[in-house]
Image (cartoon, coloured by chain):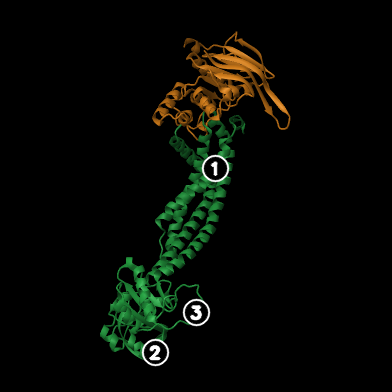
Chain colours: A orange, B green
Amino acid sequence: MDVIELTNIVKTYDMGGAEQVVALQGVSVTIRKNEYVAIMGPSGSGKSTLMNIIGCLDTPTSGQYLFNGLNVSEMDDNALAKIRNKEIGFVFQTFNLLARSDSLHNVELPLIYAGIPSAERKRRAQETLTHVQLGDRVHHKPNELSGGQRQRVAIARALVTRPSIILADEPTGNLDSKTGEEIMMLFEELHAQGNTIILVTHEADIAEHAHRTIRLRDGKVESDQPVKNRRIYPRAQAS
Amino acid sequence: MHFLTELKEGLAISFRAIRANKMRSVLTTLGIIIGIVSVTLMSTAIEGVNRAFAKSAAAFGTDVLYIQKFPWVSNDDWATIHNRRRLEVSYAHRIERQSMFSDAVAPVLATRRRALNGSNSMEDAMVTGTVSQYLSAAGVTLADGRFFTPEEASGGRPVAAIGATVAENLFPREDPIGKTVRVAGFPYTVIGVFEKQGGMFGAFTSDTRIFVPLVSFQTHYGGRRDVTIQVRVSDMKKMDDAKLELEGIMRNLRGLVPGKPNDFNINQQEILTQTFEPISLIIASIGLFITGLSLFVGGIGIMNIMFVSVTERTREIGIRKAIGAKRRTILIQFLTEAAALCLIGGLIGLAVAFPLSLVVDQFLPTAMPLSVIFIAIAISLLVGLISGFLPAYRAAKMDPVEALRYE
C-alpha cells in the first residue's frame, strides 16, 4: 500500500519582486508502507523542500500529494497540523526538544496535542521511552542528557503517536560516529518492527542503511534505486 | 484537542516561561501592579465619597419633608424666591391638625449665635428654636439626657439640648447635663446631648446645634424669621401622597388661587441624592479614566514583553507546530501566558492596595468593596488577553518551516 504518492510536485519561492527560486521542478515519488528510503542530494538540490512537503510542514506550489490516499496538497493549516500530529514522526538533526521540559513531557507533547487523557499519555510516553532504552531517564531535561540520548528522546517523541512515517532529517548530523551508528541501529530496529522510515541525508554511508535511495539534483529526481550493499547490523538482522 | 486541555498545557508552559525569566516577569508585572493598585484605590475612594455622602444625607432623614421658603436645589431666579412671603410658625399647628400622612410636625427657627461656658466658647453655634415634637419629626437620637417636654416648650423654659460638637467644644472635660450654657447672653440649663451625626453637611446636622424651646427663641432672638416646618411622614411608601397633601394644605394657608405657582418648597433628602448622583458619576468616570491610563501603560508593557517572548521562542513554536500544535493551540498558549502575567500582577496589586485602602479608610468611611476585588481580577485578565492578542496571533500564524529554521 502506498503511504506517500507525490505526482509532479513543483515548489517555487518568491524572493521578493519578480524573482523566483524553483526548489522542486516536477518531482514524482511513491513510497510504500514499511519502506526504508533515503533521500539524498547536495545542498540546494531541493531535498529540504521535499522533506518539508512530505512532512506536511509546507504545501507544493503545484502537483498532487496523496498521503494514505488523502489529498494533502489541498489541506488547510489545521488539517495539516492534524496529519503532522497523528501520521508523521519528525526526527531532526538538532533534536529540537523543548529545553525546559523533561524527557517524559517532551515525548508526551504530541499526545497532548492529540487530546489523549493524561494517564494514558504518561503510560505511552513512558513505554516509548523504555522502548528506546531511556526508561531510566524520564525526568531528565535535555541538557542533562548526552547527544545520543537526546536523539533517542526525539525518536521516542516521533514514535509515540504510532505514525505512518518517520521522517528523519540528518538524524546523525550532530552526533559522533559511534553514537550515530547506535541511532542508525535503532532506526534499523524500528524498520524491522514495521515502521516506514524516510531518511534525509547527504552522507552516503548513512544512506546505505536504507533499502532504497532517491537522489535529487537541481530540484529533480536524479536516480531512484534499491541500495545494493546495505549496511546491516547483526542485532537488526536477528530481530 | 479540548479547550481545557489546551488551557492546562498553556498554563503549565506559562508558569515555566515566567519562572525562567523572573526579572523580566517581575518588571513587566510591575506595570500591571501599579495600574491595579491605582484603579482599586480610586474606586475605593469613590466608594468612600459616596458612602460619606449617603451618611450625610441620611442625617436629613429619608422620611422627613422640609417645608421651606427656599428650595435646596434650584435653577429658578433667586430674586423671585427671595421675595416670597415669609413662612409662619403658626402653619405648623394647621398642618398638624389637617395632615393625614404625617405623624410629627415641628416648626424650626435657627440663627447663629455665640455660645459660652465659662472660658469655653463657640462662635457660630446654630441656635435652634423648636417644639418637643422635633425629636420624632427629625428622627434624631439623644446620647444622654432628654429633650424638652411639651410643657417646657410652651412655657418657654430656659432649657437646651445640645449637639455633639457643641458638647465637645463647651464641655471638653465635664458632663454637660445640668450645666449652664449661655447663648448670646441668655442662660440655659443643658438637659440633653445628641448623638454625633458627622457627615459633609456640618451645618445641617444636630452636631453644631443648640436646641431651645421655640418660645424662648422668639423672645430672645426675635421671631420674624423664616421658619422650616419639618414633617415626618408615617409611611415611607406614601411620601408622594404626603407631599401632595402638604402642598394642598400650604397653598390653602398661603391663600394661593389655582394657577398661581407655589411660593414655598417641600424639600426632601432625595433631592440631595439626586443632585449628587450625576456629579459623583462624573468624578468617578474621570478618576477611573485617569487611573485606567496607568493600567493601559501596564498593558503595553505586557504586549511588548510578549512580542519579545514570541520572537525568542520562535523555534519552540516551530517544534510545537511540527508535532501537531494547531494555530489555536499556539494562540491559546501565548494568550494564557499574557493573562497569567497580568493575573499575577492583578493579585499582587490587590494585595498591595488592600492595606492602602485601610489608610484611605482613616479619612473616608470606606472599605475596599468586595466587587472591586472581582472587577480588578477581571480587568487584569482582560488586559492580559487584549495586550497578549497581537503577539499570540503573530506566534499562531508563524510558518513552521521558517520557525524551525530560526536560530
Dot in front, 2 or 3: 3
Location of mark 3 (residue)? B80
On the image, the x and y values in percent for residue A97 come to 53, 30
Q: Earlier in the sequence, mark 3 or mark 1?
A: 3
Location of mark 1 (residue)? B389
- Secondary structure, mark 1, is helix
Q: Residue furthest right?
A: A18
Q: Earlier in the sequence, mark 2 or mark 3?
A: 3
Which quarter of the picture shows residue A95?
top right
Dot in front, 3 or 1: 3
Question: Is the Cβ of the residue at disc 2 closer than 8 Å to that at disc 3?
Answer: no
In this view, A103 is above or below B29: above
Which quarter of the picture shows residue B116?
bottom left
Inspect this view and state whether residue B22 appears. no
On the image, the x and y values in percent for residue B358 come to 42, 62
Measure how far apart labels 2 and 3 are at the Cα level.
25 Å
Judge the density around disc 2: few (<14), some (14-19), many (≥20) Cα neighbours within 10 Å: few
